[in-house]
Image: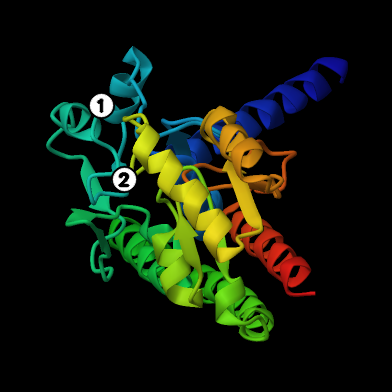
């Protein structure tokens, strides 16, 4: 009798293991280039996706140097998703290793592109309107690769877009109460052009669209002059770069640093920008607080 019970227990354990393995094998293996896409895929794919992300949290995708494990991840993935628009300058050589049966998706396909001094601004996710395009692109690709889960994937898309639209409406009402001349911000680099375009916020930065070049003394002096001439009070460092440049501008201009904004990467899981929605909420709440303080 005891042996029979042990055999039954072993059979149940093996069955459970088999179900677990089969469930794992049924997941779509997705590689994302940076954390914002990782979060979107997890939210939209749910338990049907296994996500491996390349550029870590709080890290600069512009300056990222791929490691051997990235090549392995891409070589074994079912789907590779990256931003495009020149954001990941290193992605092309990794995609050369993609298998014929591996799909890839440019998440930004179809967005209305902004340009700065003739250069394409790749930070399109900093717009609620654009993120809807990202969400639709990702969901459509997941449906294409997992048609059996179409209904659930559509439901997840609807729920996610409901959350983004709620947040957009709430912050838009608050920002509209703030005079346009008070909506001026200084950050490290030009990562918030789409956000500024959407909410009529003017962003000033000593660095361009990427952090792969140093700001010239002339660029820094120009920003300091604008801070003084226009009475700018909102000065923010970014999570992905060294704060020394902004600290120097703060000292020279006499304007205190107001906090931290998240531009190209999410925070760690315990931080204020652990998800895309958290990031947008944190950034906009921080800006509104600075504008309202300046307005009083």
Q: Which of the labelled discs sits on residue 75, or is there none? A: 1
Q: Is residue 23 above or below residue 110?
A: above
Where is residue 66, by image quadrant? top left
Residue matched to label 2:
82
Where is residue 180, by image quadrant? bottom right
> Residue 148, how many percent across, how many down?
39, 63
> Residue 226, how many percent across, how many down?
49, 56
Asked whether residue 258 is in view, the answer is yes
**As rendered, which of 234 and 222 lies closer to the eye?**
222
Q: Which of marks 2 and 1 is in front?
A: 2
Coloration of the structure image? rainbow
Q: What element carries label 1?
A: helix
Q: What element carries label 2?
A: strand
Which residue does the image show at 62% across and 26% down from the upper left? Answer: 14
Asked whether residue 29 is in view, the answer is no
Q: How far separated are the C-alphas under marks 2 and 1?
A: 15 Å
Q: Residue furthest right?
A: 2
Crowd rating for badge 2 (residues with CA inside 10 Å; few <14, some 14–19, many 20+): some
Q: Is residue 51 left or right of residue 11?
A: left
- Image quadrant holding the N terminus, namely top right
């Amino acid at each position: 009798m005891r042996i029979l019970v042990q055999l039954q227990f072993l059979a149940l354990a093996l069955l459970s293991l088999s179900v677990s393995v089969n469930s794992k094998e049924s997941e779509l293996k997705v590689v994302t280039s940076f954390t914002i896409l990782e979060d979107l895929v997890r939210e939209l794919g749910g338990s049907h996706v296994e996500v491996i992300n390349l550029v870590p949290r709080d890290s600069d995708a512009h300056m990222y140097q791929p490691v051997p494990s990235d090549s392995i991840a891409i070589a074994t993935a079912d789907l590779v998703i990256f931003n495009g628009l020149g954001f990941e300058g290193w992605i092309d050589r990794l995609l050369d290793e993609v298998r014929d049966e591996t799909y890839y998706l440019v998440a930004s396909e179809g967005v209305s592109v902004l340009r700065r001094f003739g250069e394409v601004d790749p930070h399109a996710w900093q717009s609620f309107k654009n993120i809807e395009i990202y969400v639709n692109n990702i969901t459509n690709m997941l449906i294409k690769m997992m048609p059996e889960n179409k209904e659930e994937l559509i439901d997840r898309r609807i729920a996610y877009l409901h959350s983004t639209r709620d947040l957009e409406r709430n912050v838009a009402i608050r920002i509209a109460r703030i005079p346009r001349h008070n909506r001026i911000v200084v950050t490290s680099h030009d990562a918030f052009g789409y956000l500024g375009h959407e909410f009529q916020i003017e962003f000033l930065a000593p660095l361009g669209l990427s952090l792969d070049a140093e700001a010239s003394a002339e660029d820094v002096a120009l920003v300091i002059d604008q801070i003084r001439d226009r009475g700018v009070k909102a000065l923010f460092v970014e999570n992905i770069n060294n704060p020394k440049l902004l600290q120097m501008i703060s000292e020279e201009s006499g304007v205190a640093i107001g906090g931290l904004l998240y531009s190209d990467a999410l925070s760690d899981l315990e931080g204020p920008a652990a998800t895309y929605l958290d990031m947008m909420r944190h950034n906009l709440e921080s800006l509104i607080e600075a504008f309202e303080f300046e307005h009083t």
